[in-house]
């Protein structure tokens, strides 16, 4: 089923929430907590799932299959929940693939106005028409486990969280991805510990737009995606607003709920992390320097130890040999500590083991992201440029 028309108007015994105008408002008019005038739908349903998609023909089919397969008698698609795909000016088969799934509503993203990113604009297009008491924003490159949506709603209600976000299990392939991604995700785990993110007493906040579940009234209090219209890291920005507005934020690693393959090429990975790293880590340059030191310790210490051992025929050979063994012990300690750090990424043993090979690329991407945001003040993603 494909339609641009969803029921609107009327009232329902549920607090007024979105009430959004047809045109995207200017960013300054979208402060969180804003209440708009559009009436609520005639009848709210349990959940609206929104999937923004721009040239996602390689992954959208698997995502939608994992979602529509959750249709069941007690959780019926079209009755208890709805699934909306927003085609963000795709030039491939994205729209055709979406039309091939029964029960999926396909919308075209509204005209992209200045002050908006493409993703936020696409999500906002669907959010204005959403009928769900809960809104789930999920990316086209995700694959959902059976029942994850219903379980997520129950989890959010149990923990009194207006915003629930999952960090998915990451699917990686090729040496560049398998060595780099554990490095990035271990730094994310250390910078945004889920326990602290979920603690209302802590100021730290984070969310992952690959799975972002928000209760309808909480979404109104946040100001919706209009409140972060120009942000390229909209999920983290919404999380910070959620902390300030005290709507309840819960965040955790959830390999039991879904998986994602973020990038299908090294070029896409470089572009994606260049867009995000400087926003995720305020100290991107310092972090790059520290990881460069890790690289030289991990690869330089064994070389230096061997060089010292080769001096055994020279004068004071015993002292040189002892220094070589001392360096080797220091290298072993560095390696163990490095692995313990990277293991926090939730990647497998082999990926963590080869992660030192990704250190040079990680350092380069940290610098590249810093340069784009702080010097050039612009970033690119999927054929569009945004202010850095």
Image (cartoon, rainbow, N blue to C red):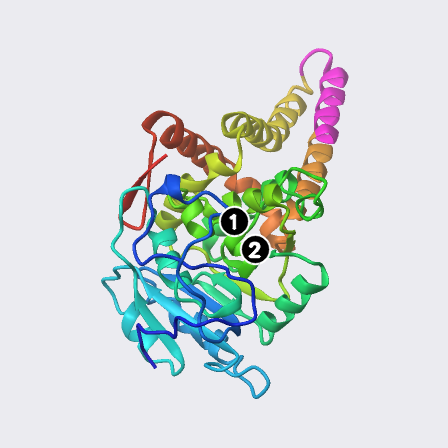
Q: Residue at x 59, y 85 (%)?
A: 74
Q: Residue at x 56, y 50 (%)?
A: 207
Q: Which mark is residue 218?
A: 2
Q: CA distance from mark 2 to mark 1?
A: 6 Å
Towards the viewer: 99 or 128: 128
Q: Label 1: how many residues lie within 10 Å, few (<14), some (14-19) or many (20+)?
A: many
Towards the viewer: 57 or 24: 24
User: Marks 1 and 2: in contact by CB < 8 Å?
Assistant: yes
Q: Residue at x 27, y 43 (%)?
A: 114
Say if residue 169 shows up in the picture.
Answer: no
In the rendering, at what x and y percent does residue 333 appear?
Answer: 73, 33
- The residue tagged 1 is 222
- Assess whether residue 65 is covered by the magenta stretch: no
In the rendering, at what x and y percent does residue 78 appear?
Answer: 45, 81
Q: Label 2: how many residues lie within 10 Å, few (<14), some (14-19) or many (20+)?
A: many
Say if residue 246 shows up in the picture.
Answer: yes
Extent of the magenta region:
314-330
């Amino acid at each position: 089923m494909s339609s641009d028309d969803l029921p609107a108007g009327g009232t329902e015994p549920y607090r007024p929430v979105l009430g959004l105008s047809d045109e995207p408002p200017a960013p300054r008019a979208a402060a969180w907590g804003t209440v708009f005038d559009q009436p609520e739908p005639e009848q709210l349903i349990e959940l609206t799932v929104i999937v923004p998609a721009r040239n996602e023909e390689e992954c959208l089919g698997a995502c939608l299959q994992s979602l529509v397969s959750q249709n069941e008698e007690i959780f019926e698609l079209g009755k208890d929940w709805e699934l909306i795909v927003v085609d963000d000016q795709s030039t491939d088969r994205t729209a055709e693939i979406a039309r091939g799934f029964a029960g999926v509503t396909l919308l075209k993203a509204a005209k992209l106005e200045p002050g908006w990113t493409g993703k936020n604009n696409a999500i906002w297009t669907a959010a204005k028409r959403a009928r769900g008491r809960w809104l789930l924003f999920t990316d086209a490159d995700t694959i959902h486990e059976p029942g994850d949506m219903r379980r997520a709603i129950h989890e959010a209600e149990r923990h009194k969280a207006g915003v629930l976000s999952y960090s998915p299990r990451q699917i990686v392939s090729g040496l560049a991805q398998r060595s780099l991604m554990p490095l990035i995700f271990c730094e994310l785990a250390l910078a945004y510990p889920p326990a602290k993110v979920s603690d209302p007493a802590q100021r730290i906040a984070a969310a992952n737009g690959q799975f972002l579940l928000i209760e309808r009234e909480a979404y109104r209090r946040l100001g919706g995606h209009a409140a972060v219209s120009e942000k390229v890291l909209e999920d983290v920005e919404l999380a910070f607003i959620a902390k300030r507005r005290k709507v309840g934020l819960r965040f955790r690693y959830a390999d039991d709920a879904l998986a994602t393959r973020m990038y299908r090429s090294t070029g896409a990975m470089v572009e994606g992390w260049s867009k995000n790293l400087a926003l995720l880590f305020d100290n991107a340059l310092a972090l790059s320097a520290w990881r460069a030191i890790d690289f030289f310790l991990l690869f330089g210490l064994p070389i230096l130890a061997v060089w010292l051992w080769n001096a055994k025929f020279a004068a004071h050979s015993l002292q040189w040999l002892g220094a070589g063994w001392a360096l080797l012990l220091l290298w072993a300690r560095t390696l163990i500590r490095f692995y313990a750090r990277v293991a926090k990424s939730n990647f497998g043993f082999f990926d963590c083991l080869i992660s030192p090979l990704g250190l040079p690329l990680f350092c380069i991407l940290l610098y590249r992201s810093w340069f784009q945001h702080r010097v050039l003040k612009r970033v690119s993603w999927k054929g569009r440029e945004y202010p850095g």
